[in-house]
Image: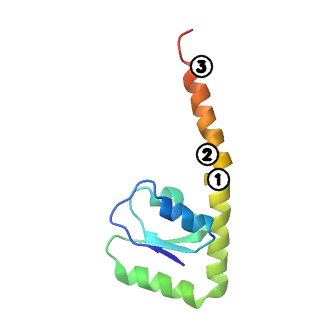
Amino acid sequence: VGVLPLTDSTANNALIEMMASGLAVVSTDVGGVRNYASGDGARLVGVGDSGAMAASVDALLRDDALRTQCGRANRATAVREFSIEVCAQRLAGIYAQASAQLPP
């Protein structure tokens, strides 16, 4: 289980690494976290809600099947959305669009 308590966040490499490693994630629902870790793989809790964070971690540690399911979902999301190939294609598309708008 990857546990990532935050007070604020935008892009977060630690979160993506947890997901890519196939971990179930418990994190704080702040900033851009939901843009990365949403769906079946993450348990997101409110800022400062240590009770909810502890309960989410405990539930995942007690349930092997749920933990495995969350980890697999996170790994699939990381590969589908954040792999180097996907990011390179997105960046190439941005550059192509920008260069097409340049004057001749």
Q: Residues within 10 Å of mark 1 (few under 14, many from 20)?
A: few
The quarter of the picture where residue 54 lies is bottom left
Q: Which residue is mark 3?
A: 100
The quarter of the picture where residue 75 lies is bottom right
Q: Which mark is residue 87?
A: 2
Colour scheme used in the picture? rainbow
State the CA–CA distance, disc 3 to disc 1.
26 Å
Residue visible at 66% across and 76% down? 69
Q: Which residue is mark 1?
A: 83
For the residue pair 28 and 84, the one nearer the viewer reads as 84
Q: Is label 1 in a helix, a strand or a loop?
A: loop
Q: Earlier in the sequence, mark 2 or mark 3?
A: 2
- Nearest to viewer (mark 3 / mark 1): 1
Looking at the image, residue 98 sits to the left or right of residue 51; the answer is: right
Looking at the image, residue 45 sits to the left or right of residue 74; the answer is: left
State the CA–CA distance, disc 2 to disc 3.
20 Å
Q: Residues within 10 Å of mark 3 (few under 14, many from 20)?
A: few
Question: Dividing the image into 4 quarters, which one contains the N terminus?
Answer: bottom right
- Label 2 is placed on what type of residue? Cys
Direction top: furthest residue: 104
**Residue 48 drawn at (x, y percent):** 31, 74
- Label 3 is placed on what type of residue? Ala
Q: Is label 3 in a helix, a strand or a loop?
A: helix
Q: Is label 2 in a helix, a strand or a loop?
A: helix
Q: Are marks 1 and 2 in contact (CB under 8 Å)?
A: yes
